Amino acid sequence: MAEDSWLVVGLGNPGAQYEATRHNVGQMALDVLAERMGGTFSSHKTGARIAEGRIRPGGPKLILAKSNGYMNTSGGPVSALAKYFDLPAERVIAIHDELDLPFDSIKLKQGGGHGGHNGLRDIAKALGTPDYFRVRVGIGRPPGRQDPADFVLKPFGTAERAALGVLLEDAADATEMLVDAGLLNAQQRYHGRSAS
């Protein structure tokens, strides 16, 4: 295991019809990280597309990964990548959408439950532990009686799209700070603050 390597997984669904949906906000944030590092995604034998790079010269190495499968089956590719790169769960970060946080917020944690998020549930099952890190990107609750399962598969609204770029930059910043300065410092920086 490379001591300074981290596997960062952006959760989402494959295909153009899902690219701009709330459920894919983790993959959108991963694109920001890849652009910062000058990395491009290419196919990997584990069933994912990966990009590798460092957040700064001499800094920690990030292996950015997007599963080629659907959100609910994220665990297999994440587990395969962790094994391939010889990384324990404590070196895995999942960036994902979070219904229980307001749209313009980010929170970080390690371990804990999945809160009904099937992608997180599948990763914990495949890794054999829930003790990986999560960068939780708030997408808010659906309005009225809209089914959450439908809500997450819809594109962001007009007002949300105007603020989305800042939110994605913040998610990328929070991920870098987690790797660079540790969970507590990243939590102190991002919890209780909104992107707007």
Image (tube, helix red, strand yellow):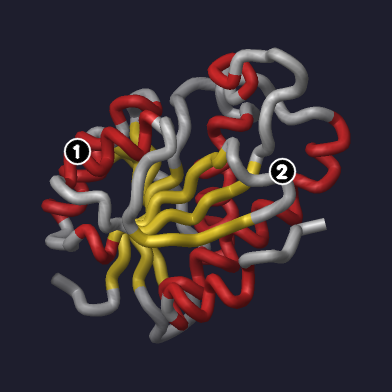
The three-letter amino acid code for the residue at tag 2 is: Phe
User: Residue 14: x and y, percent?
Assistant: 45, 25
Q: Report the residue marked by disc 2.
A: 103
- Give the mark nearer the N terminus: 2 vs 1: 2
Q: Determine the residue positioned at 58% across, 17% down.
A: 17
Q: Could you tell me which secondary element the residue under label 2 belongs to?
A: loop
User: Residue 42: x and y, percent?
Assistant: 36, 43
Say above or below: 122 vs 136: above
Which one is in front, 154 or 98? 98
> Is 95 on the left-hand or right-hand side of 170?
left
> Mark 2, residues whose alpha carbon is within 10 Å: few (<14), some, or many (≥20)?
many
The C terminus - image quarter: bottom right
Q: Report the residue marked by disc 1.
A: 125
- Give the total number of marks visible in the rendering: 2
Q: Determine the residue positioned at 17% across, 59% down.
A: 85
User: Residue 140: x and y, percent?
Assistant: 68, 37
Kindly indicate the quadrant of the structure image that contains residue 49: top left
Which one is in front, 112 or 70? 112
The three-letter amino acid code for the residue at tag 1 is: Lys
Kindly indicate the quadrant of the structure image that contains residue 158: top right
